[in-house]
């Protein structure tokens, strides 16, 4: 649908720059990578049944004398912008931290929409073979990152978890005390490890599906 520009970009022109990056498939590759990471994060994070099974697995139910299923539903609804946390089960510090978490998920949702739009634009401007190649490269990049993260998490998940929080949060509200804060008792590091593994596995499966899809579509 357009004339291919030469690979050279002379005098700055926003349209030439745009077409150059579209031809190089860079936006598509980045968009696919982000989608393959962010969508599994959102799917896993809002799956209440997953949390219920984790509570049974790690004996979390025995640590409280109230309905913690209801409390985790309040948390997932809150970070998914479906309600507010008014319960006294969480103190002010925990509520402020959850507000920070909700902001991160709002950013992730914005990025998902942006990546879907980018993928759609790429589909329009790129030839079919180029578009499928961009999908494939995005999936391959995702698998490489997943394998690296998988090894890192297996070696030392706690250190990775701390580094993640230091990068994502500008405050120390995430430093919770099990003696004072219910949130860290409700969601200990073991559960977050399982969350991380589930995200990586889901991303890996979807990435492999894209790679096989590209392979058979081009045969």
Image: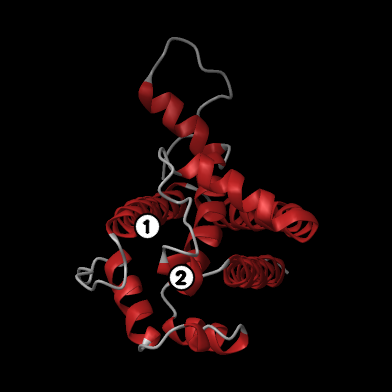
- Mark 1 touches mark 2? (CB < 8 Å): yes
Left or right of residue 79, residue 56 in this image: right
Question: Dot 1 corresponds to which residue?
Answer: 105
Q: Position of residue 159 (x, y in %)?
A: 68, 49
Q: Quadrant of the C terminus?
A: bottom right
**Could you say whether the residue bearing mark 2 is in a helix, strand or loop?**
helix
58 w.r.t. 12: above or below: below
Left or right of residue 8, residue 88 in this image: left
**Could you say whether the residue bearing mark 1 is in a helix, strand or loop?**
helix
Q: How many marks?
A: 2
The reply to whether residue 63 is visible in this rendering is yes
Question: Dot 2 corresponds to which residue?
Answer: 45
Q: Position of residue 174 (x, y in %)?
A: 45, 51
Q: Residue at x 39, y 51 (%)?
A: 111
178 w.r.t. 148: above or below: below
Q: Residue at x 57, y 53 (%)?
A: 33
- The earlier-in-sequence mark between 1 and 2 is 2
Quarter holding residue 193: bottom right
Quarter holding residue 106: bottom left
């Amino acid at each position: 649908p357009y004339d291919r520009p030469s690979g050279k970009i002379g005098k700055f022109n926003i349209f030439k720059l745009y077409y150059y990056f579209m031809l190089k498939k860079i936006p598509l590759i980045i968009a696919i990578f982000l989608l393959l990471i962010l969508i599994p994060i959102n799917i896993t994070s809002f799956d209440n049944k997953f949390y219920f099974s984790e509570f049974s697995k790690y004996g979390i139910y025995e640590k409280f004398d109230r309905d913690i299923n209801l409390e985790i539903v309040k948390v997932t609804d809150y970070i998914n912008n479906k309600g507010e946390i008014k319960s006294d089960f969480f103190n002010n510090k925990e509520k402020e931290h959850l507000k920070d978490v909700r902001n991160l998920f709002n950013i992730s949702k914005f990025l998902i929409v942006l990546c879907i739009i980018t993928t759609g634009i790429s589909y329009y401007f790129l030839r079919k073979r180029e578009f499928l190649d961009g999908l494939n490269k995005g999936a391959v990049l995702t698998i490489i990152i997943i394998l690296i993260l998988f090894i890192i998490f297996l070696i030392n998940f706690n250190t990775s978890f701390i580094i993640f929080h230091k990068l994502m949060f500008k405050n120390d509200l995430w430093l919770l005390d099990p003696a004072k804060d219910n949130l860290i008792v409700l969601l200990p590091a073991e559960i977050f490890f399982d969350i991380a593994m589930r995200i990586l596995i889901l991303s890996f499966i979807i990435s492999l599906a894209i790679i096989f899809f590209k392979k058979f579509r081009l045969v």
